[in-house]
Structures are given as structure tokens and as C-alpha cells.
Image (spheres, rainbow, N blue to C red):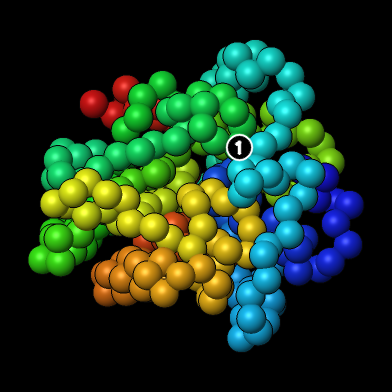
Amino acid sequence: MALARRTQVNDTFIAIVALLCSAGCQATPDTAVTPAPLQDSITVSPEPTTPTTNAPEEPAMTEDLKDGEFRIVPVRDIEEIRREALAATPPEEVGAFRQGELVELTDLDPTIRLDVRYATEENFMGSRMYEEGRAFLQRPAAEALVYIHQTLGEQDLGLIIYDGYRPWYVTKMFWEATPPHQRTFVANPASGSRHNRGCAIDLGLYRRSTGEVLPMPSGYDEFSERAYVKYEGGTAEQRDNRATLREAMESEGFIVNPTEWWHFDFADWREYRIQNKRFADLD
Ligand SMILES: [Zn+2]
């Protein structure tokens, strides 16, 4: 990603924070014993430092950020990394946690739409990471999400899901595949991520009557300033759509990632353990 060569603090910040979601929504060590601050990185504050009141400029792109798409070149064969990651053991977490129950969103409401990018090659790894394009969350989060989806239906809108629960081994795969000089930007499997806990969701909006995905100020997993929730560029319609999504999610207590309009944490994420089951094992 050549991010280390970037000279502007803000550019680096953008890249650091933005990658955290797709690459694992890196959480600080966040056991129930020692709740971590609500941020997805050890090194950056959750609030963007970029002045957002100025007229937005076209976001800068790095060598690895072309047309808003971020890609890495895996350091080793992905299948070899997958085998190793599947054989590895997630970090042990101490403390009291709730009994988790991961439920499939489309089981609760089949009109929730899926576009799970990690089940395709259309992601920053350029590789298929999930065996199936499915989305799960812890039950209270899933039920809240379904309520939001159904309420949005009154406006002819619905939720389209890009990612939900992510088995820990996939977070480890991201880490192992990423060149060491770029690992600052991916989640450390030693800490896991909120996606690993079944408590983070990446999503957008679609119009039920037409199936159209509503345009947002940036694409999903576009690692640039355009992904900021306070980004003032783009069209009024795009900003309105972003606001509609955020308001709907916040009404049920989800917390937006300030640098990724598509990423929301379930408020009680600290109460759930890192999990490692594959989707097929959740049936
Ligand atoms: Zn995310």
C-alpha cells in the first residue's frame, strides 16, 4: 500500500483507519475485564482530524489505492496461509462474557440483501476469504438490525450487508498475508476484531421497489477521505443516503466508525468473545 511513504499526517490517518474495518476492524485488546476505548486502532483517535468544514478536495490516492480500491500483494500463497490460520488458536480471553449466539441475518428476514465481498475476489486481498456469502451477528445485534431494516421499509429502503461476523482465522489470514511493512494497517489477530465477536456490521442501503443500491459518498471499502462520515464532498443525495443509514443504525444503538460510513459496532460488543467458527459450522 506504500502508505509508509505518504508524507501527510492526514493521508496516513485516512489509510490507517480505513483499512482497519475491511482488514479486521482491529480492536484494541478489549476483554470484558478491561474495556477498551471505542476505537478500532491502537494508534489513532476515533475522530478524524481532517478539517471537514473546508471545501473537500479529491482524496489523494496511494500507489496501492487506485480508483478507491485498496489491494495488497499477499506475501505467500493464500491457501497455505489459510491452512495455517485454520490450525491456529485464537487468543485466550479472560473475564465474563455473554453466551454468544450467532444468527444468520437472512434467517430472520430474507429481504435483507447480501453482497458479502470476502466471499468473492472483490476485496483488498484480491482473494476469496469466505467459503460462503453469508452474514451472521450475535442475536441481539441481529434482531436490532432486522428492526432497522423493517423500519426502513416504510421508506421503501432496506439494508444491504457487505460483512458481518468474521471468523478469527480470516483476521489471521489478513495479517499473515500482508507484507510486514503494511501490517500497521491490518488487525492484529492477537487482539482480534469486533467482526470476530459477531458485533460489527458493514452495510449500505438499497431501494426495495427497484433493487437499486443507494449511492454513498464513497464505495464500500474505499480507503480515502470520502469514506469519512463527516466528508462533505460528493452529492447532496449521497450525503443524505449516508445520513439516513447512520440515523437508522444509531436509533438502535449501533455506533458508526467515523472513518467508514459503512461500519457499525453493536454497542455491547465488549461482552462477546472472539469466535472462530466457519459459517458452515454455524448451521
Ligand atoms: Zn467493518
Residue tagged by mark 1?
124
Can you say whether 133 is above or below 49 in the image?
A: above
**Drawn side of residue 262 relative to residue 233, left or right:** left
Q: Which residue corresponds to the image point at 84% horizontal and 66% vertical from the top-left?
A: 8
**Drawn side of residue 235 relative to residue 222, left or right:** left
**Drawn side of residue 100 relative to residue 94, left or right:** left
Q: Which three-letter amino acid code belongs to the residue tagged 1? A: Phe
Q: Position of residue 282 (x, y in %)?
A: 29, 29
Instruction: Name the residue nearer the viewer: 93 or 56.
Output: 56
Residue 247: name its quadrant: bottom left
Residue lying farthest to the left in this orientation: 154
Q: Which residue corresponds to the image point at 89% horizontal and 52% vertical from the top-left?
A: 5
**Drawn side of residue 193 relative to residue 211, left or right:** right
Residue 101: name its quadrant: top left
Decide if residue 139 is in sight here: no
Decide if residue 149 is in sight here: yes
Q: Position of residue 119 (x, y in %)?
A: 43, 28
Quadrant containing the N terminus is: top right
Q: Position of residue 223 (x, y in %)?
A: 62, 53
Q: Which residue corresponds to the image point at 37% horizontal and 52% vertical from the top-left?
A: 203
Crowd class of label 1 (few under 14; some 14 to 19; many from 20; radius 10 Å): many
The tally of labels here is: 1
Whether disc 1's CB lies below 8 Å from ligand 1 is answered: no
Circle 1 — which element? Answer: loop
Instruction: Name the residue nearer the viewer: 272 or 1.
Output: 1
Q: Position of residue 224 (x, y in %)?
A: 64, 58
Q: Which residue corresponds to the image point at 31% horizontal and 71% vertical from the top-left?
A: 244
Instruction: Name the residue nearer the viewer: 234 or 30.
Output: 234
Quadrant containing the C terminus is: top left
Instruction: Name the residue nearer the viewer: 64 or 90.
Output: 64
